[in-house]
Image: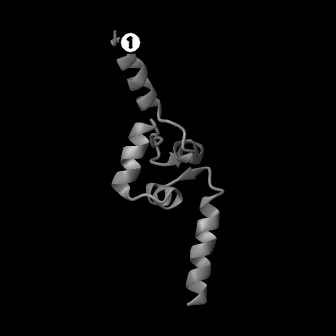
Amino acid sequence: MAQSEERIVMKAVALCFKPFLKPEEAQIYCNLERTQLAKRCEEFLVFKNDSGYYKREDLDRMMSGAPSPLLDAAKNHSSKFKK
């Protein structure tokens, strides 16, 4: 049983140092389910590369708590039409 838990911990630590993450690894890294991850990635303009991997730096930017670029654009766009 201890070996199984050790393997899980080693994999979790390895995720923190990998520059590119598989979609399943990105779910674990961000602590989000598949649909939540997809919505957040769309909102923050984070996309998979040609190989199907997410860039960890993009995921870090998404999870930093900063406002999304799409929401900022919507706020700026709607304020242009108000009188």
Residue 81 placement: quadrant: top left
Q: Secondary structure at mark 1?
A: helix
Instruction: State the residue at coordinates (66%, 56%).
Output: 17
Query: Looking at numbered disc 1 in the image, what kind of residue is underneath it?
Result: Lys
Residue for badge 1: 80
The image shows residue 19, relative to residue 77, as above or below, that is below
Instruction: State the residue at coordinates (56%, 50%).
Output: 20
Q: Is residue 50 left or right of residue 10?
A: left
Residue 12 in the image, given as x and y percentages of width and height: 59, 67
The image shows residue 6, relative to residue 67, as above or below, that is below
Which sits in the foreground, 29 or 64?
Answer: 64
The image shows residue 24, relative to residue 69, as above or below, that is below
- Quadrant location, the N terminus: bottom right
Residue 13 in the image, given as x and y percentages of width and height: 64, 66
Which sits in the foreground, 50 or 20?
Answer: 20
Instruction: State the residue at coordinates (58%, 46%).
Output: 60
How many other residues sit within 10 Å of disc 1, few (<14), some (14-19) or many (≥20)? few
Which sits in the foreground, 20 or 30?
Answer: 30
- Quadrant location, the C terminus: top left
